[in-house]
Image: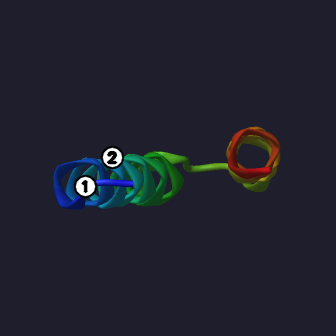
Amino acid sequence: MSMIERIRTRRDAHRRARAIEHALRSANSPAVRDEILAIAQRHMS
């Protein structure tokens, strides 16, 4: 894996993590929060 690919992969992972955090913060019900976490975990594995 080249240096550029590694940076790009890390940047994408960071962007995804920020998006998930933002969605969790703006989710106002526990059910929605659980759903977002379930989707996030499905995509991480």
How many neighbours does mark 1 have within 10 angstroms: few (below 14), some (14-19), or many (20 or more)?
few
* Observer-nearest of 45 and 42: 45
Residue type for callout 2 = Asp
- For label 1, the SS is helix
How many neighbours does mark 2 have within 10 angstroms: few (below 14), some (14-19), or many (20 or more)?
few
The residue sitting at 82% across, 46% down in the picture is 38
Quadrant of the frame with the N terminus: bottom left
- Residue at the disc numbered 2: 12
In this picture, residue 4 sits left or right of residue 42: left
The answer for how far apart the CA atoms under marks 1 and 2 are is 4 Å
The residue sitting at 54% across, 47% down in the picture is 27
Number of on-image labels: 2
Q: Residue 15 at what x, y percent from top left?
A: 30, 50
In this picture, residue 15 sits left or right of residue 7: right
Q: Residue 26 at what x, y percent from top left?
A: 42, 49
- Residue at the disc numbered 1: 11
Residue type for callout 1 = Arg
Whether residues under marks 1 and 2 lie with C-beta atoms below 8 angstroms apart, the answer is yes
Which color scheme is applied? Answer: rainbow
* Observer-nearest of 45 and 40: 45
Q: Residue 23 at what x, y percent from top left?
A: 46, 46
